[in-house]
Amino acid sequence: MPEVFIGKKPLTNYVMAVVMQFMQGANEVVIKARGRNISRAVDVAERVRKRFLAGQVDVGDIKIDSEEVVDPATGQKRTVSTIEIKLVKK
Amino acid sequence: MPEVFIGKKPLTNYVMAVVMQFMQGANEVVIKARGRNISRAVDVAERVRKRFLAGQVDVGDIKIDSEEVVDPATGQKRTVSTIEIKLVKK
């Protein structure tokens, strides 16, 4: 299943990436993000759902979790939250 | 159903608020947040689930949405994403 991983680029990049997946025939697309980008993942899902593909996709399953990562700067372990938001073609 | 709305205070405040609700007998607690605080809402849910009440609560339904708000500073309308994360006692 196609995935779009949210990073630091402008939101529109990710919105377009999701829309393109649906345009190319995908029935489901998963938007993934970690840490502070989790809010942006929800922004992307909502812009696709309510604006770019209004009435054409629904929010499917949403999963949250967390994982331990080693902070490259300090070498210390810390826990980072994650989200997966599935958008499904109606 | 008890709700904890995530704002700008330290995460621990909200983690404790959720834990207290379960200690006082709640079977379900909904963690709510908007905008940039959405990532913090996931952090709170994960800390409760994996640390403070490890093995005692599950993540239930997660809802995302968005709403139009008027920016008090500029008077302009803008869209803000929202999340609701339900934690359920096992």
Image (cartoon, coloured by chain):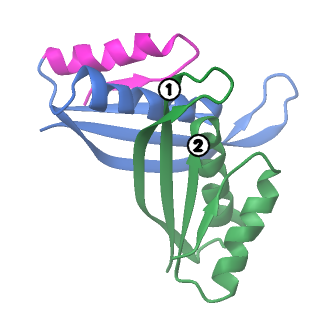
Chain colours: A blue, B green
Please name the amino acid that badge 1 sits on.
Arg
Q: Alpha carbon of mark 2 to alpha carbon of mark 1: how far?
A: 17 Å
B30 and B53: which is toward the camera: B30
The relative height of residue A70 versus residue B56 in the rendered view (above or below) is above
Res. A22 image quadrant: top left
Q: Residue at x 15, y 31 (%)?
A: A56
Q: Position of residue B53 (x, y in %)?
A: 67, 73
Residue found at the far right of this picture: A74
Q: Would you identify the image quadrant in which residue A25 lies? A: top left
Q: Is residue B12 left or right of residue A17?
A: right
Position of residue B33 in the picture relative to residue B13 (left or right)? left
Q: Residue at x 33, y 33 (%)?
A: A30
Horizontal and vertical percent position of residue A31: 39, 31
The secondary structure type at the circle numbered 2 is: helix
Q: Secondary structure at mark 1?
A: strand
| Amino acid type for the residue under numbered disc 2 | Ile
Residue indicated by mark 2: B38
Is label 2 or label 1 in front? 1
Q: Which chain does the residue under circle 1 lie in? A: B
Q: Residue furthest front?
A: B75
Which span is picked out in magenta?
Answer: A1-24
Q: Is residue A81 visible?
A: no
Q: Is residue A62 left or right of residue A51?
A: right
Q: Characterize the local packing of mark 2: few (<14), some (14-19) or many (20 or more) Cα atoms within 10 angstroms.
A: many
**From the viewer's perspective, is residue B46 above or below residue A58?**
below
In magenta stretch: residue A9:
yes
Determine which residue is flagged by label 1: B78
Establish if B80 lies above or below A60: above
2 or 1: tag closer to the N-terminus: 2
Percent of width and height locating residue A29: 27, 30
Q: Residue at x 40, y 43 (%)?
A: B65
Label 2 chain ID: B
